[in-house]
Image: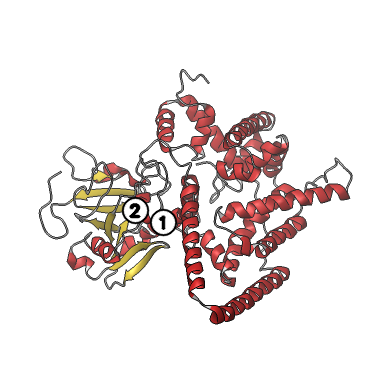
Amino acid sequence: MSTNRHPIEQEELMAYLDGELPPDQATEALSHLELCPECQTLAADFRGISQELMAWEVDSPEVGIPSEINVALRERLQTREAAKVGLARLGNRVMTSRWIWAGALAIVCVAVGLKLTLTSRNRNEDRSTAYPRMASIEKYLMPDRNAEIAVARSAAPEAISADAEILVFGWRGYETAIEGKNGFVCMVERSWMSPFNSAEFWNPKVRVPLCFNPAAARSILPLTIKRTEMVLAGLSKAQMIDSIKAGFDNGELPTPEPGAMCYMMSRAGYLNDAVGHYVPHLMFYFPPIDKSSWGADLPDSPVTLNPQFQGGPEPITEFVIPVGKWSDGTAAPVM
Amino acid sequence: MTSDEALMLEFQGGSRAAFEELFARYRKPLYGFFGRRLNNPERAEDLVQETFLAVIRAASRYEPRALVRTYLYGIALKLLAADRRKFLTNSTLGQSAPEPKTDRTPECVLWVRQAMEKLDSPDREILMLREYEQLSYSDIAELLRIPVNTVRSRLFRSRLALKGYLESQAKSNPALRASAGQPHPGRRGMQ
């Protein structure tokens, strides 16, 4: 294959199919692949090989935890419990200010170590954007929990969000800050809900307030939770994509329920560097359908196909319809 | 769903339930790992057990620097190497036990296995780690202690070799090719 005719090498094409190219190269590979029959054939061959290899399945006998493991497990847990009791007694006797400072220092060291670990795991993600890798976790946190609750609520009119469940993002992921009554769930999404090839996938400034209706809370919210867990676990993009695909394959992740939608009417949001807080809008989720069925992106149509999941591992089509007011009832700019 | 890493930390903190969840998640993948490399169900089962015993023994030393998945396959690779050394010591050097063809083994599986055996051992290991264990290039590089670029180039070479072999077989036996090419719902290779 000549590099004069093909802007990407065959090996790079393979890496693209494996989800191992950084976003800018992946975009280039995809653009070329769409136009090059020769590379399409090679891609089909690579996919065919993977599929044929999958014929070699190994049936595993269904067994519980073997007795040897149970014994080892019991011994380990008992030893640990004994050590804890011993430490507690020791602690009661000699708890002085020196120990307190030593403990605090240890916690700081662990926190710094975890931060470095999570940051370094994503070091190879993408060197070509302003946000080449995951920033430290605290950059994605909102320092004021009440402020995050308020921003989450601002995604929808008060008549909806006042009784909604509110989720806030913390060191361990999303947690319920306020229980809801009406089945809606409001939260502030972070940058990793962007397309995987987005240059702003790791932009720590991104804050996307939204309120899922009950159908979306059941069938779209799990995806947000899943991506967030994987990010916090330090998975690479390729691993996240693999896991999401597997999640849909094995039913762990649901497909959009009929009627799934969300409100995004906050003026406090920051969707990305390009559009800032954008305009107030509603979003509607479907299993993959053609955008023409909604007349999306046609001249003068108010309906737009959202690129969030296009070309991604999620089998979801998402339409956007701008609305004329922010959630507080004030007029919004015309698109 | 709780992440593997969070489960591992919970287990480290004394949670039996966390270990049981990790066992449930990884018993079958690990069995597949050993099963494909050893073609001996009993040894595969033993080594799965050895892997989890190693996890229990080393739990206090686990640090969340690597994914649990990579950590487990790292242990598995070491156990596999040790098992192979032991096996070679206890049998005639240079002769691996031939895997008998059984009536239950589909032709397409035999065909894939024969194709894999044509590859150089290091290339085959990289291909298997990618295709069956679905590890990233960087994870494979870390486990095998080779550069990421080497992983990529060897993987490319393996796939091209496999493609050539499968095509030559298909010419000589078109029915076999059609059988092997059937889709397998629920399983996924390349994107």
Q: Which residue is mark 2?
A: A190
Judged from the image, the secondary structure of the residue bearing numbered disc 1 is helix
Which of the pair A53/B102 is nearer the observer?
Answer: A53
Count of marks placed on residues:
2
Disc 2 sits on a residue from what chain? Answer: A
The part of the image, by quadrant, that contains residue B55 is bottom right
| Amino acid carrying mark 2 in the image | Arg
Residue A333 against residue A28 in the figure, above or below = below
Task: Point out residue B183 in the picture as x, y percentages from the top left corner.
Answer: 56, 44
Identify the residue at the far left of this view. Answer: A331
Q: Residues within 10 Å of mark 2 (few under 14, many from 20)?
A: many
Which of the pair A220/B123 is nearer the observer?
Answer: B123
Which of the pair A293/B81 is nearer the observer?
Answer: B81
Residue A55 visible? The answer is no
| Amino acid carrying mark 1 in the image | Thr
Residue A104 against residue A306 in the figure, above or below = below
Mark 1 vs 2: CB contact within 8 A: yes
Which of the pair B99/A18 is nearer the observer?
Answer: A18
Residue A196 against residue A163 in the figure, above or below = above
Task: Point out residue A55 in the picture as x, y percentages from the top left corner.
Answer: 63, 45
Q: Which residue is mark 1?
A: A228
Q: Earlier in the sequence, mark 1 or mark 2?
A: 2
In this rendering, position of residue A199 left or right of residue B108: left
Q: CA distance from mark 1 to mark 2?
A: 9 Å
In this rendering, position of residue B160 left or right of residue A67: left
